[in-house]
Image (cartoon, rainbow, N blue to C red):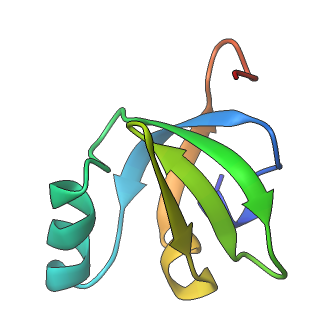
């Protein structure tokens, strides 16, 4: 599933990132790598998310979240 379809209050695992080279490298530098856990804190409109990634909160727009493939974490919820 795409990150833009993620539900608030659930944890997901990053499977694949398909963004332009610079954007993808920037997200990787911030810690969003393959198999990284991502917790959705809040949703703001269509596909705009506030996430928690490795202890830091980030806001991601729809153009980014629609290109990040995730799967549900085994525990589903956290925090």
Q: Quadrant of the rendered structure where residue 24 is?
A: bottom left
Q: Quadrant of the rendered structure where residue 54 is?
A: top left
Residue in the picture at 68% in, 48% down: 40
Residue 60 or residue 22, whichever sits in front:
60
Residue in the picture at 32% in, 50% down: 32
**Residue 71: % across, % down:** 59, 37
Q: How many marks?
A: 0
**Residue 4: % across, % down:** 68, 67
Relative to residue 14, is residue 60 drawn left or right?
right
When the figure is inspected, residue 30 is found, relative to residue 78, above or below; the finding is: below
**Residue 53: % across, % down:** 44, 44
Relative to residue 1, is residue 77 drawn left or right?
right
Seen as rendered, the residue at the extreme front is 56
**Residue 7: % across, % down:** 82, 49
Residue in the picture at 62% in, 83% down: 62
Quadrant where the C terminus is found in the figure: top right
When the figure is inspected, residue 77 is found, relative to residue 7, above or below; the finding is: above
Residue in the picture at 61% in, 24% down: 73
């Amino acid at each position: 599933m795409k990150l833009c379809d993620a539900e608030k209050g659930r944890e997901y695992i990053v499977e694949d990132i398909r963004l332009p080279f610079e954007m993808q490298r920037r997200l990787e530098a911030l810690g969003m790598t393959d198999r990284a856990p991502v917790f959705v804190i809040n949703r703001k409109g269509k596909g705009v998310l506030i996430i928690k990634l490795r202890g830091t909160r980030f806001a991601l727009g729809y153009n980014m979240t629609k290109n990040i493939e995730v799967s549900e974490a085994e525990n589903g919820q956290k925090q």
